[in-house]
């Protein structure tokens, strides 16, 4: 039986995180998805996540198998939405940059990662969660819907390929 858990990422994890990010970029490209095809996220973005204490890794048998970032506080990308947030008053965390290693793809570990992050933050009294993804990223849309997130509309960011994102919210 495998030992699976999440923990905060550290600077010395970068050399194991970046190949996972690169695999995810390739996977998205092969799936015809333009997400992450502009060079983002790069090592600078992941280092910034780590510096901001927002970076998390998924560990399977003492090996990094996945990565994500969880941002607390108001996310400027969520200030304007073509739709309506159900709860726009209480604090929320935003989950970004979910990537699972090719070695572990298909094992539902992204669901485990998402559930673990929600549980961890719920224990810290966070009741609202937000996620956004490319309109063509059906995998992430399916993942978040299965986790109970509800589509709230579309947001826009600075991506040079496609600035529009589908925005989801989970209120507990």
Image (cartoon, helix red, strand yellow):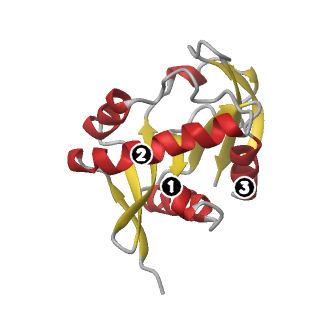
**Residue drawn at (62%, 68%), measured in percent from left and top?**
107
Which mark, residue 122? none
Query: Farthest residue toward the bottom?
Result: 1
**Which dot, 3 or 1, sits closer to the camera?**
1
Circle 2: element type: helix
Task: Examine the image and state in which quarter residue 161 appears.
Answer: top right
Circle 1: element type: loop
User: Which residue in the structure is indicated by mark 1?
Assistant: 101
Q: Quadrant of the C terminus?
A: bottom right
**Residue drawn at (30%, 42%), measured in percent from left and top?**
53
Image coords of residue 171 (percent x, y): 65, 49
Judge left or right: residue 135 versus residue 25. Answer: right
User: Which residue in the structure is indicated by mark 2?
Assistant: 19
Image coords of residue 91 (percent x, y): 50, 39
Q: CA distance from mark 2 to mark 1?
A: 8 Å
Judge left or right: residue 131 versus residue 7. Answer: right
């Amino acid at each position: 039986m495998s030992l699976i858990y999440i923990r905060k990422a550290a600077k010395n994890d970068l050399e194991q995180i970046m190949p996972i990010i690169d695999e995810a970029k390739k996977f998205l490209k092969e799936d015809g998805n333009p997400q992450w095809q502009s060079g983002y996220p790069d090592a600078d973005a992941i280092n910034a996540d780590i510096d901001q204490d927002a970076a998390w890794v998924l560990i399977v048998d003492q090996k990094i198998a996945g990565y994500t970032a969880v941002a607390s506080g108001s996310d400027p990308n969520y200030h304007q939405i073509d739709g309506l947030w159900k709860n726009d008053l209480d604090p929320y965390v935003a989950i970004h940059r979910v990537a699972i290693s090719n070695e572990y793809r298909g094992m539902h570990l992204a669901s485990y990662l998402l559930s673990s992050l929600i549980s961890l933050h719920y224990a810290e009294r966070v009741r609202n969660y937000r996620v956004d993804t490319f309109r063509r990223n059906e995998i992430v849309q399916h993942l978040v819907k299965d986790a109970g997130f509800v589509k709230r509309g579309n947001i826009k960011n600075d991506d040079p390929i496609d600035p529009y994102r589908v925005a989801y919210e989970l209120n507990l």
